[in-house]
Image (tube, grey):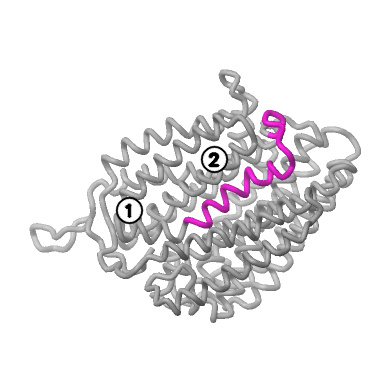
């Protein structure tokens, strides 16, 4: 994910007028965005199917948490090193390898006969997705220049914005459809024909590219330490409640934190040219604060909507399709407010991020209050819709400018590494949120799921209030244009 990527797709024109762009760049972009959708939709499609998965595999609450967290952890532990490998050995090769692995792990998930097998398959599926994603964004930077590059990234961002709505609705529809009696397994089977199409068209249209300036040793042992550290932190948080919070859990948690901290310093001492966690980045208070905002933001969202989906279906009697339709209100808030974000950020800077965090907190507070007031089975959707819509507005006000604002404080030569770390924090934060908020929910589930969600809600609400406070450490306005690096 180096910022010094060369562009082998542009060749000199015969008339000497300058380089000619790769002629099939938009066809290649279409294929790569289709592959990105495999990951984007998969992040939300599973949530809607979780109650059905729980019944079908007799899964425990911890199993359900791991079904979501394993994917995020696999993604977080692999993303940075996958970008480095693509830069060195070729992005097309890594892309096609990642899509193949995603298809195979989707098949394994669909065929899972126990919760443990599903969790393992989901973890490997996250690894495969992490191999795919950095190759897409790096290839965009080499295939497109100038105004076209902005259009390509804008298209990618727009599709990413609607993918959550598509995922939650598709998860419900496919689960209820019960094609061939597959039930929830259909949400994984659908990946197979899409992956096959991507492989055929990708092999034909995607150009080969790599960073010819990429030299030095890739820290593969360090990546294993990073992966082990992330798992060691999340493992006791997910399993601790059912095991009575034993001593080994606290020791495991401490060891995970220590491993990541030691990795940060050891890479510099070992002279790793492309470190996973560059120490120079963490010396910048604005970057460290922004990293925490990224972690808390995704943690609050992933954790809350996990328990909200379970509450809707298992506690309120919603079908998967009805739950998916209700969640469209959240995505509608994001989609309708997105055009206003850039002009507001240009005028008010970080105040927009602070507002977004507070509006998100307010929307979740509304949802929690509406849930707390429910006294009968199948609470009507309308009391929940305004809160979900507000949360969607807050989401987009925070998510669109956040990475650009953080990266504006980072030197250009560190922008690629910083972007990878922020993406890792996003996935790891989601896994942490599922663990922490999931524990708050399931620890009160014996008193009823409505009581459980009212106890879990404040954790997510508090995460966004803390985000608003941490945003005060960000620059008042983004300096320079790092949108490309952010992508």
Say which element carries label 1. Answer: helix
Residue mark closest to the camera, 1 vs 2: 2
Mark 1 crowd level (few <14, some 14–19, many ≥20, 10 Å Cα):
many
Spatial CA span between label 1 and label 2: 24 Å
At horizontal 67% and vertical 61% (from top left) the residue drawn is 252
Where does residue 446 sit, x and y in percent of width and height?
87, 42
Q: Which residues are magenta?
A: 54-78
Which corner quadrant of the image does residue 119 belong to?
Answer: top right
Q: Which mark is residue 91?
A: 1
Tell whether 460 sits left or right of 477. Answer: right
From the viewer's perspective, is residue 265 above or below residue 176? below
Residue 13, visible in the rendered structure: yes
Say which element carries label 2. Answer: helix
Mark 2 crowd level (few <14, some 14–19, many ≥20, 10 Å Cα):
many
Where does residue 258 sit, x and y in percent of width and height?
61, 70
Tell whether 344 sits left or right of 383. Answer: left
Magenta segment, prevailing SS (helix, strand or loop): helix
Tell whether 346 sits left or right of 199. Answer: right
* Residue 63 highlighted magenta (yes or no): yes
Q: Which mark is residue 121?
A: 2
Return the residue nearer the eye: 463 or 188.
Answer: 188
Where does residue 438 sit, x and y in percent of width and height?
74, 50
Which residue is the extreme one toward the top?
180
Return the residue nearer the eye: 378 or 247.
Answer: 247
């Amino acid at each position: 994910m180096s910022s010094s990527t060369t562009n082998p797709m542009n060749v000199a024109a015969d008339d000497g007028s300058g380089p000619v762009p790769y002629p099939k760049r938009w066809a290649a972009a279409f294929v790569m965005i289709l592959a990105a959708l495999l990951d984007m939709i998969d992040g939300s499609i599973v949530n809607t199917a979780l109650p059905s998965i729980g019944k079908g595999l007799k899964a425990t609450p911890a199993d359900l948490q791991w079904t979501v967290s394993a994917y995020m952890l696999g993604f977080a532990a692999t993303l940075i090193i996958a970008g480095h490998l693509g830069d060195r050995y070729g992005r097309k090769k890594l892309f096609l390898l990642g899509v193949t692995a995603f298809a195979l792990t989707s098949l394994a998930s669909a065929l899972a006969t126990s919760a443990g097998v599903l969790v393992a398959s989901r973890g490997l599926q996250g690894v495969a997705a992490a191999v795919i994603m950095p190759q897409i964004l790096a290839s965009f930077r080499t295939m497109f220049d100038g105004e076209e590059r902005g259009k390509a990234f804008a298209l990618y961002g727009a599709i990413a914005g609607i993918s959550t709505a598509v995922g939650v609705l598709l998860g419900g529809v496919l689960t209820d459809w019960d094609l061939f009696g597959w039930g929830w397994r259909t949400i994984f089977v659908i990946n197979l024909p899409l992956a096959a199409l991507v492989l055929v068209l990708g092999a034909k249209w995607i150009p080969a590219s790599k960073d010819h300036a990429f030299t030095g040793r890739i820290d593969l042992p360090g990546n294993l330490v990073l992966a082990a550290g992330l798992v060691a932190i999340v493992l006791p948080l997910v399993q601790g409640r059912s095991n009575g919070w034993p001593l080994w859990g606290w020791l495991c948690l401490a060891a995970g934190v220590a491993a990541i901290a030691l990795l940060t310093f050891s890479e510099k001492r070992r002279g790793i040219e492309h470190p996973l966690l560059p120490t120079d980045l963490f010396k910048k208070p604005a970057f460290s604060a922004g990293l925490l905002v990224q972690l808390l933001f995704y943690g609050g969202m992933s954790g809350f909507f996990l328990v909200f989906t379970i509450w809707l279906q298992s506690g309120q009697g919603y079908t998967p399709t009805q739950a998916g339709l209700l969640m469209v209100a959240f995505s509608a808030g994001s989609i309708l407010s997105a055009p206003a974000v850039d002009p507001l950020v240009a005028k008010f800077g970080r105040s927009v991020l602070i507002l977004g965090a507070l509006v998100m907190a307010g929307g979740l507070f509304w949802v929690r209050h509406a849930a707390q007031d429910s006294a009968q089975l199948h609470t009507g959707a309308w009391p929940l819709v305004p809160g979900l819509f507000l949360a969607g507005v807050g989401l987009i006000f925070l998510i669109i400018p956040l990475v650009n604002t953080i990266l504006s404080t980072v030197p250009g030569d560190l922008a690629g590494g910083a972007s990878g770390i922020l993406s890792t924090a996003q996935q790891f934060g989601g896994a942490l949120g599922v663990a922490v908020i999931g524990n708050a929910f399931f620890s009160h589930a014996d008193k009823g799921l409505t009581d459980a969600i009212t106890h879990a809600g404040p954790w997510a609400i508090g995460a966004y209030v803390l985000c608003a406070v941490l945003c005060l450490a960000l620059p008042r306005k983004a300096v320079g244009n790092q949108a490309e690096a952010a992508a």
